[in-house]
Image (cartoon, helix red, strand yellow):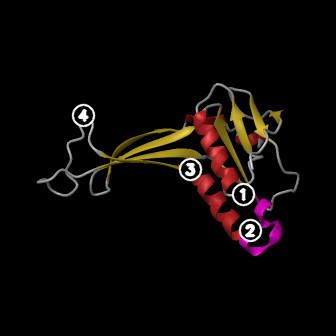
Amino acid sequence: MKREAKPVREVTGFRRQSFSLHHERQIPPKLVVLGASAVDITSSADGIAGTSPGLVNLAQTTTPGTISLTVGGVARNIAEAAHRVLSSESADGSSATTLVTPIGDDGFSRILLSEQHRLGMRSDGFLTVKGESSAVCNMLLDSSGALFGGVADMDIVQNIDESKV
């Protein structure tokens, strides 16, 4: 069943840009979690035959491996865990947790919203910041699974003005 797009309402209290709030539920939450949600892109390099475990030359080249895309962010992960606990305790628990998080107006925001809905979680605290990119963390793991390096673009969380939330 495809969800129809809900109207958004303009909200103030965030720095730099205007943003809109995804509005869908009227039931007050029991728990509000404030912070980052992000798309995590994890690249894992395959080992090369004849080399030590974990040893892969990743400098200035591409290498065979696998890539996964998941949702994360500390606040989002906490909100999901709370949602799972509270929704298992009662029938109305599925609306008990609200995540207040800024997201960009981009493809990554659609991934975050889609996963939120797939899990049956509220998205009325998702604040779309026009002209900004959603938070993304790109991690590169070596063939043993150890972090080799990465890039975290989390600047959107700076839009939260704590005094007005």
Contact (Cβ within 8 Å) of mark 1 with mark 4: no
Residue 25 appears anywhere in the view = yes
Q: Is residue 34 left or right of residue 23?
A: left
Q: Which residue is mark 1?
A: 120
CA separation in Å, label 4 and label 3 = 29 Å
Q: Secondary structure at mark 4?
A: loop
What's the residue type where badge 2 is placed? Answer: Ser
Contact (Cβ within 8 Å) of mark 4 with mark 3: no
Residue 157 appears anywhere in the view = no
Q: What is the quadrant of residue 159 in the picture? A: top right
Q: What is the quadrant of residue 21 in the picture? A: top right
- For disc 1, the neighbor class at 10 Å (few under 14, some 14 to 19, many from 20) is some
Look at 27% across and 53% down and name the residue there. Answer: 143
- For disc 2, the neighbor class at 10 Å (few under 14, some 14 to 19, many from 20) is some
- What range is drawn magenta here? 87-97
Q: Is residue 143 left or right of residue 41?
A: left
Q: Nearer the viewer, mark 2 or mark 3?
A: 2
Where does residue 92 sit, x and y in percent of width and height?
A: 83, 66
- For disc 4, the neighbor class at 10 Å (few under 14, some 14 to 19, many from 20) is few
Q: Which residue is mark 4?
A: 61
What's the residue type where badge 1 is placed? Answer: Gly
Contact (Cβ within 8 Å) of mark 1 with mark 2: yes
CA separation in Å, label 1 and label 3 = 18 Å
Mark 2 or mark 1, which is nearer the start of the sequence?
A: 2
CA separation in Å, label 2 and label 4 = 46 Å
* The furthest residue to the right: 26
Q: Which residue is mark 2?
A: 87
Q: Which residue is mark 3?
A: 73
In-front residue for pair 77/159: 77
